[in-house]
Amino acid sequence: MIDISEVLTMQSDTVAQWHQNPIDNPFEPSHGKEAIQSIACQQHQFNYLLWHEEDIARSPDVSDAQIAQVKRNIDRYNQLRNDWIEKLDDWITEDLERRSIQPLSTAKLNTETPGSAIDRLSILALRIYHLDEQLQRTDVDQSHRDKVMTRLAICRLQRDELSNSLRELLADIYAGLKQHRTYRQFKMYNDPTLNPYLYDRNRTAPSGN
């Protein structure tokens, strides 16, 4: 079963590490010997990269060409982020099969999958890191620090509550008290066969002489 404490530690530690040593290759996560830890780290990397592309997209100093590239990066990382949420849930399905665990006939399905909850914890780790950065600034007044401290306390409480709820959900799933299945999101905008702006463009493109 997934050790949520290890996931939380990985998420907070790697955010700090990546800010000091930027990621060279997001497809080579280096954290965790177990497969589930590696998948969680990979998914967390895409959130990290997505977060910083979103920051760039809101800068008034970048050119239109840069914004276009950033938008493509955001789409790519968001697709990968969601793909790896599904991989987290697929790993749990496979682990349940390895352990021959079947849900009871009375087991109900949760509204959120464990993979989605791990994704939310990843975002909280990023938010907490960046809020804490705000407290280190020397160009802000006390009202700014007070606002940041209030938000930081809320985020830490949310992380504690969400991680505890996730532990309970996983315990119920592995006890057969809750059903588990991967929630397939089927993102359409990156698929050239499903996005009309992509397949219409290919259909109407002029042919070469």
Image (cartoon, helix red, strand yellow):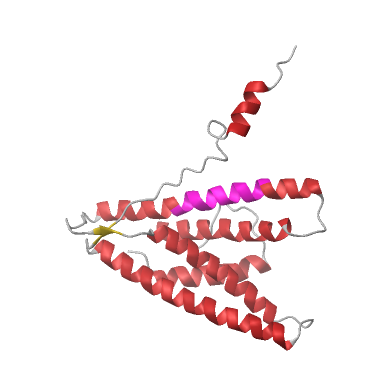
Left or right: residue 176 versus residue 126 is: left
Q: What stretch is highlighted in magenta?
A: 72-85
Establish if 43 lies above or below 149.
Answer: above
Left or right: residue 209 versus residue 122 is: right
The percent position of residue 186, horizontal first and vertical second, equals: 46, 43
Name the quadrant containing residue 19.
Answer: bottom right
Residue at position x 73%, y 46% in the image: 68
Residue at position x 68%, y 56% in the image: 53
Establish if 31 lies above or below 89.
Answer: below
The percent position of residue 84, horizontal first and vertical second, equals: 48, 52
Farthest left residue? 105
Q: Does residue 75 appear in the picture of this structure?
A: yes
The percent position of residue 75, horizontal first and vertical second, equals: 61, 47
The percent position of residue 104, horizontal first and vertical second, equals: 18, 58
Does residue 55 show up magenta in the picture? no
The secondary structure that most of the magenta stretch takes on is helix
Of 159 and 146, nearer the camera is 146
Establish if 91 lies above or below 10.
Answer: above
Q: Does residue 32 appear in the picture of this structure?
A: no
Report how many numbered discs are placed on residues in the image: 0
Name the quadrant containing residue 207.
Answer: top right
Of 52 and 30, nearer the camera is 52
Residue at position x 80%, y 59% in the image: 60
Farthest top residue? 209
